[in-house]
Image (spheres, rainbow, N blue to C red):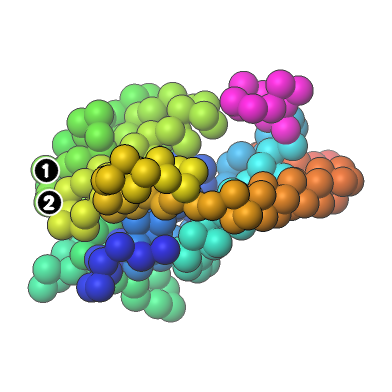
Amino acid sequence: MSYSENAPSVVVVGGGVAGLNAALYTARAGFETTVVNAGESILRRNGHLENVPGFPGGVNPRTFLDLLEEQVADAGAARVTGEVTILEELDGQFVAETDDEVYEGEYAIAATKSNPDYLDAFDLALDQQGSKTYVDVGDRGRTNVDGLYVAGRLAAEPHQTTIVAGHGAKVGLTVVEDSEVPYYHDWVAPEGYFTGRGREVPPGVEEIDEAERAARERDSMDRMREAFAERHPDEPTMHPSVAADDEGE
């Protein structure tokens, strides 16, 4: 869905839970969104994911990520593979460079784990905690560079899926709020909720009739049945150090 004729663009560095949730919000607000992911999310190492709202028995983390990636794609965001070696600002655009490609955006969200080396072009305040280096940002992920934001673990958020997911969503929404895109709320309302009171439907909101509501619910149910019909075929990815030890035996 789009709410702007001249859609702003954003490049998200990092395709884990925080980056994907940030991209979900910007894409749904009509931003041209590109997620650059260097490889597999660390969440795929998890044996079983607990403490996720709406999953009382927990959920397979690989299934969870598959569904999140599908959701982000449905929202219109592009996902590409590549390790960003440098992010810099050139001529009013943020430019993310990999070994093979260059991606640009009017806004940039850094959402990698805990290595900010690719941000060396910016004079950012860093926070060293043991072997990890984080970027010191405000609650909404803003940095001292206009248009540059940091989300999730790189912003020293706790290493918990729902927390970094929520922070990514908050940062994505902050980008929207800081832009000139009119946006009220990412909300689907029943038909007449606003218009029945003589009000215009606010930007970012949809009113849908009963037939459309039922169709969306059926689609949601079908997709979830398919996702959970069988166990996920992939096993957890073991930590690289364990794999190296096994190879040395």
Q: Taking the image as drawn, is residue 19 in sight?
A: no
Instruction: Characterize the local packing of mark 1: few (<14), some (14-19) or many (20 or more) Cα atoms within 10 angstroms.
Output: some
Q: Position of residue 12 (x, y in %)?
A: 37, 57
Label for residue 146? 2
Of tags 1 and 2, which is closer to the observer? 2
Confirm whether the magenta stretch covers residue 158.
no
Label for residue 123? none
Q: Residue furthest bottom?
A: 100
Residue 53 as seen in the image, left or right of residue 208: right
Residue 204 as seen in the image, left or right of residue 143: right
Residue 153 as seen in the image, left or right of residue 236: left
Q: Quadrant of the C terminus?
A: top right
Question: Residue 179, located in which quarter of the rendered image?
Answer: bottom left
Report the amino acid beneath label 1: Asn
Q: Position of residue 70 (x, y in %)?
A: 61, 57
Q: Write down the region rendered in magenta.
A: 49-59
Instruction: Characterize the local packing of mark 2: few (<14), some (14-19) or many (20 or more) Cα atoms within 10 angstroms.
Output: few
Q: Are marks 1 and 2 in contact (CB under 8 Å)?
A: no
Task: Give whichever of 103, 133 is nearer the camera.
Answer: 103
At a point 27% along the width and 51% down the height, the residue shown is 200
Report the amino acid beneath label 2: Asp
At a point 52% along the width and 29% down the height, the residue shown is 162
Q: Position of residue 105 (x, y in %)?
A: 26, 67
For numbered disc 1, what is the local secondary structure? loop
Q: Taking the image as drawn, is residue 206 in sight?
A: yes
At a point 74% along the width and 46% down the height, the residue shown is 221
Q: Quadrant of the N terminus?
A: bottom left
Pointer 1 residue: 144
Confirm whether the magenta stretch covers residue 53.
yes
